């Protein structure tokens, strides 16, 4: 039986070798641009978001110009993504709040970020982690699935429970990179419907893999 400490050590060693560079696949130039991109990325691929954002940022280069716009205009720029009506409302609301309460500057604090329309805990953690390199762990569907399958978390039935256990067990300085390790692993290897276990170097410690073997 591998201890939790040994499990994390093996996961860190594996990803350090196989994904020495792990970062977001969203294209952005500053905190405002990443915030927009992450809001757009909900239930939408990064590839699609990266097609939408260049003309969007040409028209709305900062929170001030976005705040001065309206939902109808924003919708026209983002209509090819999922849930464009809601996202258009969130983006305009986010920009207005950013201007009114933060002078147009994206805050680094996770709690303050969540005051912005369209920004939940996951998005706030992404911004804190990616832009400000703070020890935050964003838990999306990929991270939730991968960590539960491998066994990095125990009885974690909510994203917050997963986040708390990961923050407790990964070294603080590795959390921003670990976030991307888990996302990319879930996106390309440990996929939802049919995980590519034959391509994974973690099968020797993976709880789900061992369970499936025992059931055969």
Image: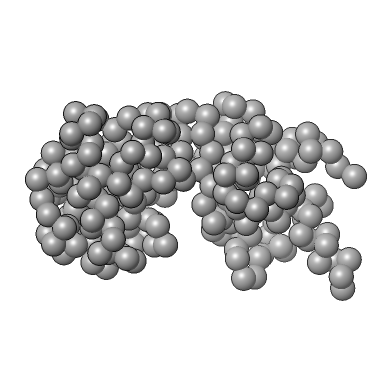
Q: Is residue 155 visible?
A: yes
Please provide percent x and percent y for residue 200. Answer: 70, 56
Residue that appears at 33% across and 49% down? 118
Residue that appears at 62% across and 70% down? 193
Q: Is residue 126 visible?
A: no
| Most foreground residue, 90 or 13 | 90
Please provide percent x and percent y for residue 99. Answer: 18, 35
Quadrant where the C terminus sits is bottom right
Report the side of 131 relative to 78 (left or right).
Answer: right
Compared to residue 4, the image places residue 188 above or below, namely: below
Please provide percent x and percent y for residue 104. Answer: 20, 32
Tell me the quarter of the picture where residue 212 sits: bottom right
Report the side of 188 relative to 202 (left or right).
Answer: left
Query: What is the tally of numbered marks visible in this picture?
Result: 0
Report the side of 13 relative to 193 (left or right).
Answer: right
Give the image's coloring scheme: one colour
Quadrant where the N terminus sits is top right
Compared to residue 44, the image places residue 194 above or below, namely: below
Residue that appears at 52% across and 52% down? 140
Please provide percent x and percent y for residue 8. Answer: 73, 38
Report the side of 94 relative to 129 (left or right).
Answer: left
Residue that appears at 15% across and 46% down? 66
């Amino acid at each position: 039986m591998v201890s939790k400490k040994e499990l994390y050590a093996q996961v860190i060693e594996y990803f350090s070798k196989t994904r020495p560079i792990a970062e977001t696949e969203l294209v952005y130039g500053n905190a405002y641009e990443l915030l927009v991109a992450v809001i757009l990325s909900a239930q939408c691929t990064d590839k699609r978001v990266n097609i939408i954002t260049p003309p969007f940022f040409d028209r709305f280069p900062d929170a001030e110009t976005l705040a001065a716009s309206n939902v109808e205009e924003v919708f026209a720029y983002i209509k090819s993504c999922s849930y464009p009506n809601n996202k258009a409302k969130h983006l305009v609301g986010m920009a207005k709040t950013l201007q009114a309460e933060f002078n147009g500057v994206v805050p680094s604090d996770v709690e303050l970020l969540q005051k912005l329309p369209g920004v939940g805990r996951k998005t706030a953690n992404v911004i804190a982690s990616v832009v400000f390199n703070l020890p935050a762990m964003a838990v999306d569907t990929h991270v939730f699935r991968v960590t539960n399958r491998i066994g990095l978390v125990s009885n974690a039935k909510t994203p917050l429970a997963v986040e708390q256990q990961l923050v407790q067990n990964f070294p603080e300085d590795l959390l921003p990179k670990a976030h991307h390790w888990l996302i990319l692993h879930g996106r390309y290897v440990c996929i939802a419907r049919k995980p590519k276990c034959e391509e994974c170097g973690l099968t020797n410690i993976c709880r789900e893999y061992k369970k499936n073997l025992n059931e055969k």
